[in-house]
């Protein structure tokens, strides 16, 4: 699986089936602070990721 982190670095990881939430936990990323796309589609934490997927993590920015 190809993982593109918020700082635009890429990481490759071989996994068995897991959820987006479990992946974020493994990466030490708070799910409240990010959006995740799986193969180009925004997904929720319960979505399943598998080997061969592309996961892109976007940091949510807010302010005034």
Image: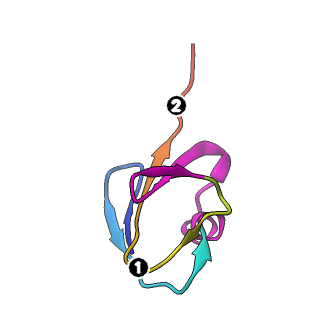
The circle on residue 61 is 2
State the mark number for residue 23: none
Q: Position of residue 54 (x, y in %)?
A: 38, 65
**Magenta part of the protein: which range?**
20-43
Residue 25 placement (x, y as % from top left): 64, 67
Front one among 10 and 39: 39
Residue, x 52% and y 31% (percent of image)? Answer: 61
* Quadrant of the drawing holding the C terminus: top right
Residue 48 or residue 32, whichever sits in front:
48
Q: Residues within 10 Å of mark 2 (few under 14, many from 20)?
A: few
Residue in the picture at 67% in, 46% down: 32
Residue at disc 2, secondary structure: loop
Residue for point 40% across, 70% down: 53
Q: Are marks 2 and 1 in contact (CB under 8 Å)?
A: no
Left or right side of 30 for 14: left
Q: Is residue 28 magenta?
A: yes
Marks 2 and 1 sit apart, C-alpha to C-alpha, by 26 Å
**Could you tell me which residue is drawn at 37 percent across and 77 percent down?**
52
Q: Which mark is residue 13?
A: 1
């Amino acid at each position: 699986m190809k993982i593109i982190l918020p700082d635009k670095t890429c990481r490759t990881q071989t996994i068995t089936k897991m959820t987006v939430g479990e992946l974020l936990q493994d990466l030490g990323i708070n799910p409240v602070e990010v959006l995740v796309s799986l193969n180009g589609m925004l997904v929720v934490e319960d979505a399943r990721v598998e080997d061969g997927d592309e996961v892109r993590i976007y940091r949510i920015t807010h302010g005034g």
